[in-house]
Amino acid sequence: MMDDLFPDDVPDWREALEPGAMVLRGFALPHVPLLLAGVNRVAAAAPFRHMHTPGGFRMSVALTGCGHAGWVSDRHGYRYQAHDPLSGQPWPPMPAGFAALAQQAAAEAGFAGFLPDACLINRYEPGARMTLHQDKNERDFSQPVVSISLGLPAVFQFGGNERSDKTQRVPLAHGDVVVWGGPARLRYHGVLPLKPGLHPLLGECRINMTFRKVY
Ligand code: MD6
Ligand code: FE
């Protein structure tokens, strides 16, 4: 009988948020050294920078990226583009191991065969936040987004398909991975202002990496 209440094919490190959205607690922990080495290499070629919204506001989150496309925001709007506007060069290639890890995480959440072509890297310092938004600049909404949290903990807001829908608050810690797609793919979401703190590996900082299939 207990088997019905707690099916053993759903280990408790996987938390379903709602259909299509899942948190994989600690999934990235064994891969932190690889991820941080890769982030450092990317940031050496394409430094973290604070972009401006189309309305002219400086974003509190600093951003870089790697792979075939990077996310860019300026007074003309936001979009993906193949070149880093700071250098005029293509974004750095995705470090070895990144895509395979994102693919494994997606498969754990029920999205087999995910082949990301871009990884956006966000850096939060205390006070930085991400207002509610949808990820909808990608071409193919049948592909999920895989999001890895590193460093200081944060509170993720997860809402509905309208900005005004009520949101749930999901705490995310170092090594947690969120996968969403399918019916959850266009949900509004954001990150509450980062609380001050000192992470043993990353100091006063949270890094979020989101893997997408843009093209
Ligand atoms: C963040 N993440 O966690 C911001 N988007 O810092 C996102 O905006 C996000 O985590 C799409 C899917 C997963 C995410
Ligand atoms: Fe997002």
Image (cartoon, rainbow, N blue to C red):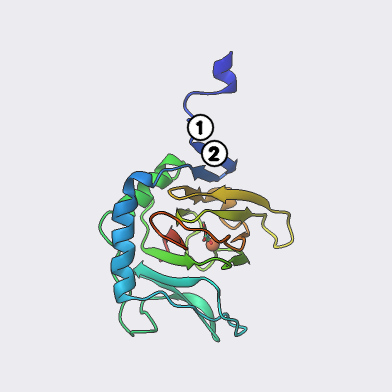
**124 or 203, which is in the foreground?**
203
Q: Which kind of residue does numbered mark 1 sit on?
A: Asp
Q: Look at the picture and state if 162 lies above or below 73.
A: above
Q: Residues within 10 Å of mark 1 (few under 14, many from 20)?
A: few
For residue 12, the mark is 1
In the image, residue 181 lies at what x, y percent?
Answer: 52, 51
Q: Quadrant of ligand 2?
A: bottom right
Disc 2 versus disc 1: distance between alpha carbons? 7 Å
Q: Is residue 174 left or right of residue 171?
A: left
Q: Name the quadrant containing residue 92.
A: bottom left
The answer to whether residue 32 is visible is yes
In the image, residue 60 lies at what x, y percent?
Answer: 55, 73
Number of marks present in the image shown: 2
Q: Look at the picture and state if 89 lies above or below 128.
A: below
User: Which residue is at a point 54% across and 39% down the rendered structure image?
Assistant: 15
Q: Which residue is mark 2?
A: 15
Q: Residues within 10 Å of mark 2 (few under 14, many from 20)?
A: some
Q: Is residue 70 left or right of residue 136?
A: left
Rendered-image quadrant of the N terminus = top right
Rendered-image quadrant of the C terminus = bottom left
In the image, residue 111 lies at what x, y percent?
Answer: 44, 45
Secondary structure under tag 2 reads strand
Identify the residue at the far left of this view.
Answer: 96
**202 or 183, which is in the foreground?**
202
**Cβ atoms at labels 2 and 1 below 8 Å apart:** yes
Secondary structure under tag 1 reads loop
User: Which residue is at a point 33% across and 84% down the rendered structure image?
Assistant: 87
Q: Which kind of residue does numbered mark 2 sit on?
A: Glu
In the image, residue 184 lies at what x, y percent?
Answer: 58, 51
